[in-house]
Amino acid sequence: MGKIRGAITAIGGYVPETILSNKDLEKMVDTNDEWIRTRTGIEERRILKVNGKGSSFMAIKAANEAIAKRGIDPAEIDMVICSTATPDMPVAINASYIATQVGAVNAFGFDLMAACSGFLFAVSVADKYIQSGSYKKILVIGTDKMSSIVDYTDRTTCVIFGDGAGVAIMEPSEEFGVQDEHLRTDGAGREFLKIDAGGSLLPPSEETVAKRQHFVFQEGQSVFKFAVTRMADAAEIVTSRNGLGGDDIQWLVPHQANKRIIDATANRVNLDPDKVMINIHKYGNTTTATIPLLLWDYEKQLKAGDNLILAAFGGGFTWGAIYLKWAYTL
């Protein structure tokens, strides 16, 4: 009997209908389409405009799709991990609400927060639970309503982020699944990508609202410098440790933060551009949802046994890479 690993057996996704294009942003802030495209690769992003709905709404849509594709009873799901930087509300976790809404009545769950690396970390955690033998069907969710924390008067951040959700079902496999990982964090990056107010350090007040301290702040140059090296480093460590050259890897699945960061990561592991999953032009940076949305978009091109390198970088700082062997062919 081989080693049991956590494998992705179904994928679901959801992006809102409302499109916010670069041309739209030109009317809102001092920017232009060419500047955004050349520096980020983004052409448009999706924005959730449904009143009274948060990140769980998109996750439920994506989860229902994944469950239907897999053809299972939701009651078979025994665990839900929701990675998000924008939960519906403090304290009351997204995971339990999503589980209830999709009919996963026998599941326990929790939220995981690791910014843009969240889905990657959640896949790692699900893999460990599956290896333990305690859980056999896990919903792994990446969902973020970034429009809820973006200041649309700040041209440095409002051009980057969009809303969306992706959900993977992970199950035990002796042949496929997570083969290796390299995950890291560094608290030195805390000041460069953050929201100042709303937490225990600086609770909400009239002053914090007036100072617009509840919106995401990013010091672009510092974040870019760290991201372009750390994400590529992690991908190279995982590939070299497993003896994987460019010909051995079918797909790089990189966090969609910036086209230049994606290109640098692909170059480091000697991958042709046609082996790199890209959808940043359509959705922008959806934070925890970027990697599962890539898998959702490219699902029909994936084959059982394909070697995938998942790589991400996020606030905190958080970063890493996972070597995953794909488990099915549509």
Image: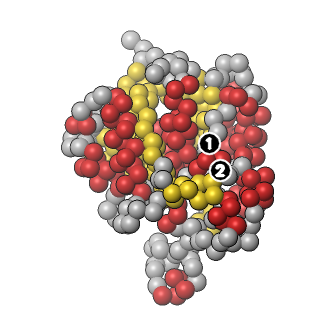
Q: Residue at x 76, y 46 (%)?
A: 260
Where residue 195 appears, as percent x and y from the top left, is 56, 69
Vertical position of residue 121 compared to residue 146: above or below: above
| Residue 21 visible within the image | yes
Q: Residue at x 73, y 31 (%)?
A: 273
**Category of crowding for the residue at label 2, using alpha-carbon neighbours closer than 10 angstroms: few (below 14), some (14–19), many (at least 20):** many
Where residue 227 appears, as percent x and y from the top left, is 70, 50
Residue that numbered label 2 is attached to: 257
Secondary structure at badge 2 equals loop
Q: Quadrant of residue 141?
A: top left
Residue that numbered label 1 is attached to: 279
Q: Along the polypeptide, which appears first: circle 1 or circle 2?
A: 2
Amino acid type, residue under disc 1 in the picture: Asn
Q: Quadrant of residue 218?
A: bottom right
Residue 39 vs residue 16: left or right?
A: right
Q: CA distance from mark 1 to mark 2?
A: 10 Å
